[in-house]
Amino acid sequence: MKPKRILIYLGHPAQYHFFKNSIFLLKKKGCKVKLLIKTKDILEQLLNEDGVDYINIQSTPRGKGRLSILLASFKRTLAVIKEARRFKADVLVGTDSSVAQAAFFLMKKSITVLEDDYDVIRNLARLTFPFTSCILVPKECCTGPYDKKRVSYDGYMKLAYLHPNFFTPNESIIHEYGIHEKFIIIRLSQLAAHHDINIRGLSFKLVEEIITLAEKANYNIYITSESRIDDRLSQYKLNIRFNDIHHVLSFAGILISDSQSMSMEAAMLGVPSLRFNDFAGRISVLEELEHKYGLTYGIPTDNPTKLINKLKEFLSNSNLKDDFVSRRKKMLADKINVTAFLTWFIENFPESKRIMKENPDYQNKFK
């Protein structure tokens, strides 16, 4: 059988982290892999730091309105069609509707990889699910009326790059930045994704209150943000290489965030996290991490007092980090090696879809 020609589209920094180990393994197995990206946060910088080849099919960031989102999506679909034809792709992989639509137009196989529930990304799902060949999601995720296309696995997307088989925290990296004492990371998100319209997060006033409490407890504060930080908070800005963020996060005492992605990453690393936005209670993978494993806590924006009280509880717990490390071990024991599974699934698609449909326990060989 000839080597697979695999086109992967990346629309977010977390998606690069998710695919990067599988990309390496697929190439090692002889597959041809082509990466397409759009300009999004630090995505391009991450690829450049790692020396990875890619084509940017949307170099100008889109606007936040619905019309801008739809127009950008249409242009991306045309660009994916063009690049997939030129590359002679056998299978197209990604989270974006442009991947599924391009593959459908070209009569090629496609894999849509997500960990958001249908009800949360309903608009994206309507543009994607009817056209894709397969929806690959963690088992907790709901795919609405498209269960026939669903293949579920016992893991999380973030575990693909933060599983201990693929990531080892390096303490010397944080010392390189002069970070030695106990510290808290505050992560601020732009909340500008397709599902983020009218979603609120951490306010300046609330961040000030968090800083006051943390400093009284002798924690240093570092703020990382997708957008420009308010000048009044600039002294707390975390200035590091983009690819070092997971090493720094690993040694944090607490993460406080309005970002879904970094809250998930903290849970994978056993770092206590408080997430504060209007998605609290709505996303299945985070709900499992919260209620089954106790690895994160979601608080809606109409209850800032609960956030502050939970932070005080964290700050007063001298065994906090050890508790979360133990909870992480339980989670890891239950989950598969997502990178190993993903690599097998893409390399052997669509046969891998048939295998998983007939025998979902086949994935246990990747534990």
Image (cartoon, helix red, strand yellow):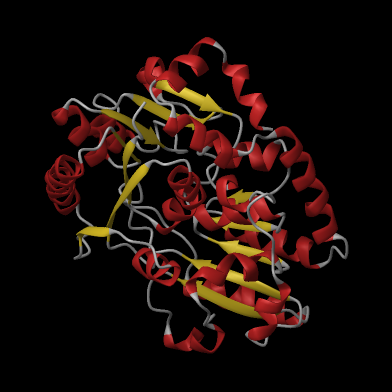
Q: Quadrant of residue 333?
A: top right
Q: Can the viewer see residue 11?
A: yes
Quadrant showing the N terminus: top left
Q: Position of residue 78 (x, y in %)?
A: 11, 44
Q: Nearer the viewer, residue 79 or 320?
A: 79
Q: Nearer the viewer, residue 345 or 138?
A: 345
* Residue at image location 74% in from the left, 83% down from the top: 180
Quadrant showing the C terminus: top right
* Residue at image location 34% in from the left, 41% down from the top: 94
Residue 90 is left or right of residue 225, and the answer is: left
User: Looking at the picture, does residue 352 appear above or below residue 226?
Assistant: above
Q: Can the viewer see residue 301?
A: no
* Residue at image location 14% in from the left, 48% down from the top: 79
User: Looking at the picture, does residue 304 appear above or below residue 364?
Assistant: below
Q: Quadrant of residue 244?
A: bottom right
- Residue farthest along the right direction in this orientation: 318
Q: Position of residue 25 (x, y in %)?
A: 50, 45
- Tally the marks: 0
Residue 7 is left or right of residue 232, and the answer is: left
- Residue farthest along the front direction in this orientation: 1
User: Looking at the picture, does residue 284 appear above or below residue 160?
Assistant: above
Q: Nearer the viewer, residue 218 or 206?
A: 218
User: Looking at the picture, does residue 152 appear above or below residue 328?
Assistant: above
Q: Position of residue 71 (x, y in %)?
A: 12, 49
Residue 153 is left or right of residue 191, and the answer is: right
* Residue at image location 30% in from the left, 30% down from the top: 110
- Residue farthest along the top direction in this orientation: 358
